[in-house]
Amino acid sequence: MLNDIIIPMILCFVFIILSIPLILQKVRPNCFYGVRTRKTMSDETVWYKANKFFGCGMLISSLFSLVVLIVAVLIPDVVSVIVVNNLGGIVVVLPMGILLIISFFYFRKL
């Protein structure tokens, strides 16, 4: 069970680390890292707003996923081994998918 949760936990930590520079607005407009749309690439103010919003959402969703995974490890009776084995990745992917949908509507308003 623990081996099935290690990779999703590592992904959570990677997402947390990647979100911090976005939140702190340390990432300048570029073609590799950050939210890249026509609006964000054409206006630096929009770039920083969009990336700060997305970074905050990524931090929150990653922390939520990490807490769920830690609870699954510490209290195995709460989450069955079968559920963790089959859904470990979904615990990370689902909150990020929800963030992408919310971000899409936020970015349209910018």
Image (cartoon, rainbow, N blue to C red):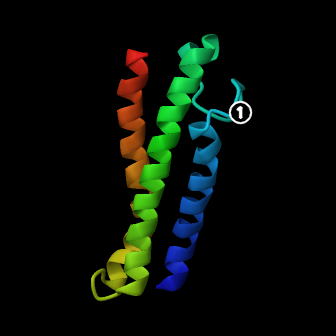
- Residue 18 in view in this figure: yes
Q: Nearer the viewer, residue 45 or 85?
A: 45
Q: Which residue lies furthest to the top in this view?
A: 42
- Residue 85 in view in this figure: no
Please say if 86 is above or below 58: below
Q: What kind of residue is marked 1?
A: Phe
78 to the left or right of 95: left
Q: In which quarter of the image is the C terminus?
A: top left
Instruction: Say how many tags the image has.
Output: 1
Please say if 77 is above or below 21: below
Which residue is pictured at 40% across the width and 45% down the height? Answer: 97
Task: Place residue 67 in its image quadrant.
Answer: bottom left
Percent across and percent down for residue 52 are 53, 33
Would you call the spot at circle 1 few (<14 residues within 10 Å), some (14-19), or many (20 or more)?
A: few
22 to the left or right of 87: right
Which residue is pictured at 49% across the width and 50% down the height? Answer: 59
Please say if 52 is above or below 68: above
Percent across and percent down for residue 46 are 54, 18
Identify the residue position indicated by label 1 in the image: 32
Which residue is pictured at 27% across the width and 83% down the height? Answer: 78
Please say if 9 is above or below 45: below
Percent across and percent down for residue 89 are 46, 64
61 to the left or right of 30: left
Q: Which residue lies furthest to the left in this view?
A: 78
Secondary structure of the residue carrying tag 1 is: loop
Percent across and percent down for residue 27 are 69, 33
Which residue is pictured at 62% across the width and 33% down the height? Answer: 25
